[in-house]
Amino acid sequence: MAPITTFYGITGPVPFLDVDIAVDNRMFVDPHAIRLHGASDRFAVRANECTESFFEEILQCVFAGNERRGLWLLQRFLEPWETRLGLAQRGFSGHGGAEDVGSWIWRALNHDINALLQVGLLKQIEDLPLFIEGIDRDITSDITTRIIFEALAEFTSHMIDRFPQFNSSGHRVDTFQCQAWDSAAREWAIKSFDLPVAGGKPLLLVPHSWARSTLLMSATRYYETKVLDYAQLERAVRLHTGKLVKTPKDQLMTEPGLGRGRVTNLNVTRRAHANNDDLIAKFKQFVDMKWTPPSGDNNLAA
């Protein structure tokens, strides 16, 4: 139909993602991008509180063996279509629904990647796509959006106050009952939110610097950098001159046990930890060092 600014007649730069209101846009909410804003804006602080409290609650269920509650919390990720982000054919509806996605995550936390949890290597929700098959940018975006729904609604309310066009020229704001994570109660809740109505449906605005076309912490990026870096060191030979000779990464990719994929990510991460090397922490340092705020990043709270 039209981008948000065109639909509402808003001119000039805006601090929200200016997506088409009628289709799914190929952008994805990235929890690590939000985290990198840290204390720079109150909405990021609120969103980070939500993801941190949710992940902590899930970990408590894993450590206590509380499968009933753990599954209940993980199987409530209703697809957040209000943002108009993601891939319709590859969201929850394309992966068997929220119950199946929640089961994948719970099974991985209790089996495949449980060893990483037990030693404290996995600390944040953005760590999961590195190791869980099927949890990529679309599912990560949907999960994150649902968890931080209240923070996004607060940002949307702020934008409604800032741009009167949301409530003028025949446009309206209505109250909707939506599922959101309550970080204080540490429970899912149905809450009332005032959201713009666009194309007959509620619209949830997303800070433009919170969404990307790819995840900052993707399984592929982790594999191509820190996983293969470590594998190179494992096989490196030091010459009598002191020079360290490393096997090229493209050659390592063809070796048994080092092919691209989350199994390799997991196995090499575990080997590194056995040698007191935290590849996940190193990867985050690498990602953070490479990251620069998007151009035109406005003060969200202005």
Image (cartoon, helix red, strand yellow):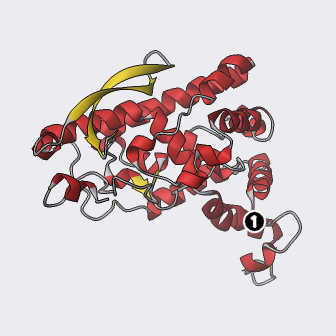
Q: Where residue 238 sits in the image (x, y, percent)?
A: 79, 76
Instruction: Specify the quadrant that holds the N terminus.
Output: bottom left
Residue 218, horizontal then vertical, whole percent: 59, 57
Residue 63 picture quarter: top right
Residue 66 seen in render: no
Label 1 amino acid?
A: Arg
181 relative to 297 in the view: left or right: right
Query: Up-down: is 9 above or below 67?
Result: below
Near-viewer residue (282 or 55):
55
Quadrant in the picture for residue 159: top left
View extreme (top): residue = 185
Residue at (77% x, 32% y) in the render: 110
Identify the image quadrant of the C terminus.
top left
Please give left or right for residue 58 compared with residue 207 in the image. right
Residue 32 % position (x, y): 48, 48
Q: Nearer the viewer, residue 135 or 7?
A: 7
The residue under the point 72% across, 67% down is 228
Circle 1 crowding by C-alpha within 10 Å: few under 14, some 14–19, many from 20: some
State the image coordinates of residue 101 (x, y, percent, origin top left): 67, 39
Can you say whether 14 is above or below 71 in the image? below
Q: Residue at x 14, y 43 (%)?
A: 170
* Residue that label 1 marks: 260
Q: Is residue 122 above or below residue 238?
A: above
Secondary element type, mark 1: loop
Horizontal side of residue 74 vs 167, given as left or right: right
Among the 4 quarters of the image, the one containing residue 128: top right
Name the residue located 47 percent from the left edge and 62 percent from the top edge: 213
